[in-house]
Image: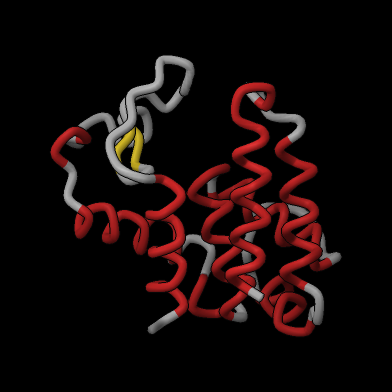
Amino acid sequence: MSAFDKALALVLRHEGGLVSDERDPGGLTNYGISQRAYPDLDIRNLKVADAANIYRTDYWDAIKGDQLPDGLAICVFDAAVNMGTDKAIRLLQKACGVQVDGMLGPNTLRAASRLPDAVARFSADRAIAYTGIRNFDLYGRGWLRRTIATAMEAA
C-alpha cells in the first residue's frame, strides 16, 4: 500500500461520511470535503472515489507527499486536510527548522528527509497550533486525539 493510500484511509476514518454541523464553518461536509471549500460540488452525493481524487490533487500533491518520508507525509497530509495546506506546510517548516514561508521547496524537503524525529516534532507543533484556532473549546479534544492517532499510525 502506498503512503498516499495509507494517509487517505486514515483521513477517511477521521472524517467519516456526511456531516452537517451548524457550528462548523465548513458547512455541509462529506468525507471531509466541505461545501465551503468546494461550493460547486454536490457534497451530499459525493463518492469516495471523487473525494480521493480531490485529496490527491488538492492536498497530497500540494504538500508534495511523494517527496516526503512516508510517516511524515501521512502526518502533513492529515494536517493539510484538517487545517489547510498552507498551515500544514508552515508547521512542517517550523518542525524542520527552516524558513517558515509556506513555500514547500527543496530546502524544506531536504530538511524533512534528514530529521530523525520529524513525526514527533511535527505532531507536537500541530497540537500546539490547534490551541489557537477558533472553536478549540468545541473540537479541540478531537483534534488532539486525531493528531496523536495520526502520529501513532505514521511511526
- Placement of 148 over or under 134, stated as above or below: below
- Placement of 140 over or under 51, stated as above or below: above
Q: Quadrant of the C terminus?
A: bottom right
Residue 135 position in % (x across, y down): 63, 22
Q: Residue at x 61, y 81 (%)?
A: 69
- Placement of 85 over or under 29, stated as above or below: below
Relative to 100, 138 lies left or right: left
Q: How are the colours assigned in the image?
A: secondary structure
Q: To which quarter of the image does residue 33 belong?
A: top left
Q: Residue at x 78, y 84 (%)?
A: 114
Looking at the picture, tell me which residue is in the foreground, 67 or 8: 8
Q: How many marks?
A: 0
Residue 65 position in % (x across, y down): 51, 71
- Placement of 20 over or under 2, stated as above or below: above
Q: Quadrant of the N terminus?
A: bottom left
Relative to 25, 113 lies left or right: right
Q: To which quarter of the image does residue 133 belong?
A: top right
Looking at the picture, tell me which residue is in the foreground, 150 or 32: 150
Q: Residue at x 60, y 63 (%)?
A: 75
